[in-house]
Amino acid sequence: MQIIDSGHSQLLAKAMDSYSLRQEITSSNIANIDTPGYNRHSVEFENALQEAQESGKAMHDVNPSIKETGDEVVLENELLEMADTQMRVQLVTRSLRHHFDTLQTGITSTTR
């Protein structure tokens, strides 16, 4: 159904998947902080999203990518990344809740 599976809900789903992946990668970076030869990994999503919006690509074509940065893992930076990602997850969760609350109101409302 077009309303339920709209571009907005697809965007929010992609964002949630990307932030979940980012949390996994950040956790992996922290877990491997003392591993000799380990380089920091990062998840790129926002740039791919912006490029897709500018080129008119569909949201299902936007996928996060994992990149090895070549940098050492710095615990403070990883903790900041975790906090930032957590705030983004909360924002997406609230937006999804609002989206589905609006749908529910539209379906069940009896007042006009």
Image: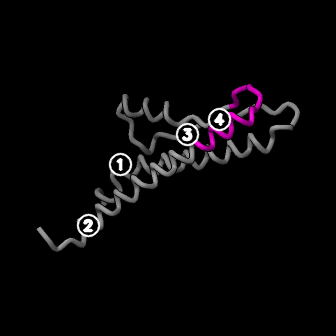
| Depicted 90 relative to depicted 36: above or below | below
Residue holding disc 1: 8
Expressed as whole percent of the image width and height from the top left, the position of residue 26 reads 68, 42
Tell me which corner region of the image, top left, top right, bottom left or bottom right, holds residue 67. Answer: top right
Q: In the picture, residue 109 is in which quadrant?
A: bottom left
Q: Residue furthest left?
A: 112
Mark 3 Cα shell of 10 Å, populated few (<14), some (14-19), many (≥20): many
Asked whether 32 falls inside the magenta stretch, the response is no
Marking on residue 74: none
The boundaries of the magenta stretch are 68-84
Report the residue at 63% width, 43% height from top: 82
Tell whether label 1 touches label 3 (CB within 8 Å): no
Sequence-first tag of 4 and 1: 1
Labels 3, 2: front one = 2
Mark closer to the chain start, 3 or 1 = 1
Q: Is residue 109 left or right of residue 33?
A: left
Mark 2, mark 4: which one is toward the viewer?
2
* Tags 3 and 2 touching, CB below 8 Å: no
First along the sequence among labels 1 and 2: 1
Amino acid type, label 1: His
Residue positioned 37% across, 29% down in the render: 55
Three-letter residue code for mark 2: Thr
**To which residue does mark 2 refer?**
105
Q: Which residue was labeled with disc 4? A: 42
Q: Is residue 79 magenta?
A: yes
Q: Which of marks 1 and 2 is in front?
A: 2
Disc nearest the viewer among 4 and 3: 4
First in sequence: mark 3 vs mark 2: 3
**Residue annotated with mark 3:** 64
